[in-house]
Amino acid sequence: MSLPFFSKRWSCKGKHVFITGGSQGLGLALAELCAAKGAARVTICSRSQAKLDLALAQVQAAAATTGSTQCHAVAADVSTFEGAQKALEAAAAGGTQPDVVFCCAGGAKPGFFIEQTQLDFETGFKTDYMTALATSHAAASLFVRVAKRDAKIVLVSSTLGLMGMVGYAQYSPMKFAIRGLAECLRSELQLYSIDVHAYFPGTILSPGYQEENKTKPAITLELEGDGEKEGLTPKQCAEGLLKGVERGRFFITTDILTELFRAATASGGSVPGNGWLLDKAKSFMAGIGIPVWRIFIADRSIQAHREQHLKDLSLSKPAA
Ligand SMILES: NC(=O)C1=CN([C@@H]2O[C@H](COP(=O)(O)OP(=O)(O)OC[C@H]3O[C@@H](n4cnc5c(N)ncnc54)[C@H](OP(=O)(O)O)[C@@H]3O)[C@@H](O)[C@H]2O)C=CC1
Ligand SMILES: CCCCCCCCCCCCCCCC(=O)[C@@H](N)CO
């Protein structure tokens, strides 16, 4: 056990870092960062071998700056327990078990609730929640089995794991579920001294973001704001995420808005915060700013959009 005020800073140096969703976006940027920071081994995992081949070359290039990192790729679908277990076994085949597992796999398919199908929701459940559940279950089981010391599991939620809004019914509830999972695991995995962290990014300018914008309703885009201006690059997010992990933060954010939502909504003190007094101040600010935004901007724009929306809906419906 480490004391809360005197704990040593964690570092990925010399560690084996395993990353799902490592073939692009946040996961790839994180892999490059850990390679550049001297991790002993970086294993990236995603379903597509073709994407992994391209990504691995980038991670190797990042590793060349220090020269001490071995880089590997494992093709696996981590949305099942079997897939996640196999992925971790393959990662360990090189001789060292992972020390830290980042669950970055995920992705949204925005759309209107009544236009989305059972398959859309099931895909959200698999891609966002099951990948996180299966990976963290396989990782925790492995860490306990080999009595790994200093092990970590990092889950990736979203701003939308702290608040929900129009267009994200297929995705946001899964990110809320990841937050619930993180809270349960933080509590239970203390039994094995495994640290758990949860990251809540805002917009990440990733390939996934480009993809989701293809089906994103106009009203969702409007409320979310201009991603290109307000979003962060995968590299900026990876740096912020790693910094949060190094400092031992439980709920990690990389933008002020998400930090306000966290302070205002996160579990009423039943989980570690980001500084008691500062959290109180942020929660106070959020308690004023967020309702003002909801009443005067969000709900107002949605209500003003009703007429246009009904026209848009009937466009996609066959004539009665
Ligand atoms: N982009 C954004 O604006 C935001 C993203 N987030 C979250 O951050 C994380 C990273 O997002 P982003 O950088 O946009 O990621 P991308 O959507 O660009 O990439 C997703 C990655 O996950 C992999 N993946 C998807 N499904 C599986 C699966 N079943 N098994 C294994 N790998 C899988 C993909 O590879 P492959 O196709 O080869 O499987 C790919 O490497 C996600 O969890 C996302 O929900 C949170 C807030 C905002
Ligand atoms: C003072 C209070 C003002 C409040 C303003 C709130 C604005 C809401 C922003 C919601 C942003 C959602 C980002 C995450 C996106 C994400 O996870 C998807 N892109 C999936 O990939």
Image: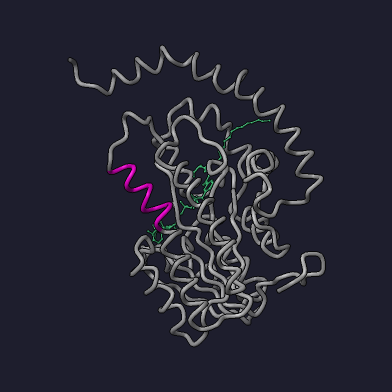
Q: Which residues are magenta?
A: 119-130
Q: Point out the residue furthest to the bottom here.
A: 95
Q: Is residue 220 visible?
A: yes
Q: Position of residue 199 (x, y in %)?
A: 59, 53
Q: Measuring 51% from the left and 78% from the top, which residue is drawn there?
A: 144
How many tags in the picture?
A: 0
Q: Is residue 53 above or below residue 306?
A: below
Q: In this rendering, would 245 be left or right of 92?
A: right
Q: In this rendering, would 85 be left or right of 209?
A: left
Q: Measuring 37% from the left and 31% from the top, which residue is drawn there?
A: 113
Q: Position of residue 154 (x, y in %)?
A: 57, 62
Q: By what rule are the colours in the image chosen?
A: one colour
Q: Is residue 205 visible?
A: no
Q: In this rendering, would 200 be left or right of 221?
A: right
Query: Is residue 124 highlighted in magenta?
Result: yes
Query: Is residue 287 highlighted in magenta?
Result: no
Ligand 2 quadrant assignment: top right
Q: Measuring 59% from the left and 48% from the top, which residue is drawn there?
A: 201
Q: In this rendering, would 174 be left or right of 239?
A: left
Q: Position of residue 27 (x, y in %)?
A: 52, 60
Q: Nearer the viewer, residue 70 or 255?
A: 255
Quarter of the picture containing the N terminus is bottom right
Give the main secondary structure, helix, strand or loop, of the magenta stretch: helix
Quarter of the picture containing the C terminus is top left
Q: Point out the residue furthest to the left here.
A: 320
Q: Position of residue 172 (x, y in %)?
A: 47, 41
